[in-house]
Image (tube, rainbow, N blue to C red):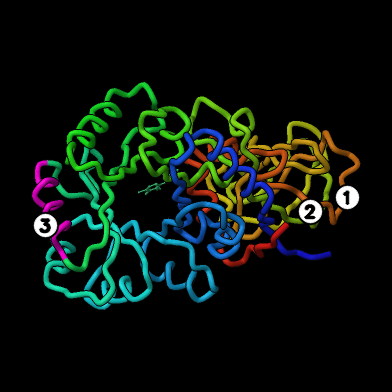
Amino acid sequence: MSRLATATIHLQALRNNLQQVRERISAGVKIVAVIKADGYGHGLITVARALHQSDLFAVGCIDEALSLKQHGINRPTLLLEGFEGEEELYAISQLGLQTVIHSREQLALLRSTELKKPVTIWLKIESGMNRLGLPAERAEQVLSELQRHKSVSEVVLISHFANADDPDNGMNSEQQHIFESCCRESGLDRSMANSAALLSNSASHYQFVRPGIMLYGSSPLPEQGAEPLGLQAAMTLRAPLIAIKALKKGDSVGYGSTWSAPEDMSMGVIAIGYGHGYPRHLPSGTPVLISGERVPLIGRVSMDLVTVDLSSLPEARVGDLATLWGEGLPVDEIAAHAETISYELLCRLTSRVERQEG
Ligand SMILES: Cc1ncc(COP(=O)(O)O)c(C=O)c1O
């Protein structure tokens, strides 16, 4: 019996989810697949290969783009955080990457650098997120400078919603208004929609949509599950049941003895814990799937192990595989139990979990 915790990456699910994106946008709108943070924890290269039919990839920084190139993946790639220093800017030009410019410092560097091969610049406009971006009032002037710059081949305008997962939030239309009023006459291509906006606000699609989380089969909208949206889990996290034991009424389980058996019962021990990235603060009652049946977590999650109540599953055997999330158990549901979002659970699995394509 293998004690390995595994994350199976479902290539067909990734392809299905890309198709779900395609079906929601008008012909001609391009898809920038967001595969930063190691493909949201699914493996950068695995995801890039599965999503080769997207129009562009978006990564955080140049190291991720270099990794794509090193694996022979030559799809147009956008650096969402842009560049730091002249060397990175040269590399961007040399490798034919596209880059965001979001700050005065990046603008100054571009101004003072002559590049052999001109680059496509995605000019990031601050519309209300107050994270990265140049002030909307400066956009006209910066744009006219970029359009005259020899090192710039093309400019795209980009901004990011702060509350797209709350479609009724008035800030969405405020941000969109600011974004649209920037360089109104320029006729430039624009990009604003992440997964949540893609699903809930077609007026924000413009020329490029930037889905991330929905490609991985998770819903970006708290009110809506992934399945009704046609999305399929791209990762199933599994680990084996390595012990089954009997508890007497009143026996406590695990560190801190936070849970006690209400009656004589059977419990199981699964070889996964916070050392693999399964959150320590998941409470008793969080579902785990064994042989298609949901059983509740009991007691504290420890570094390598979790414990479950097997009283409803007398047929469970040592060696059975438990699903912690994925097929049959949406990661969004586990994220809700952990009081976080699926993004965090998917991204924080450690290297102890073996990734397998399936
Ligand atoms: C600039 C930008 N665009 C798009 C996305 C994709 O967002 P989501 O995963 O919510 O679709 C992200 C993700 O954080 C982002 O930072």
Q: Which residue lies furthest to the right in this view?
A: 315
Q: Is mark 1 on a helix, strand or loop?
A: loop
**Cβ at disc 1 under 8 Å from ligand 1:** no
Identity of the residue drawn at 79% across and 32% down: 263
Would you say 254 lies left or right of 280 here? right
Between marks 3 and 2, how big is the CA–CA gap?
Answer: 62 Å
**Is residue 181 part of the magenta span, yes or no?**
no
193 sits to left or right of 349:
left
Magenta part, dominant SS: helix
Q: Mark 2 points at which residue?
A: 241
Q: In the picture shown, does residue 174 fall above or below 188?
A: above
- Which residues are the magenta region? 137-149
Q: Is residue 275 among what the camera can see?
A: no
Q: Which residue is drawn at 79% across and 36% down?
A: 293
Quickly name the residue at label 3: 145
Residue 321 location, x and y as percent?
79, 52
The residue indicated by pointer 1 is 317
User: In the image, residue 264 lies at what x, y percent?
Assistant: 82, 36
Amino acid type for the residue under numbered disc 3: Glu
Front-most of 32 and 295? 32
Q: How far apart in space, not on screen, are marks 2 and 1 (Cα)?
A: 7 Å
Q: Which mark is first along the chain, 1 or 3?
A: 3
Q: Residues within 10 Å of mark 3 (few under 14, many from 20)?
A: few
Amino acid carrying mark 2 in the image: Leu
**Which element carries disc 2, helix, strand or loop?**
strand
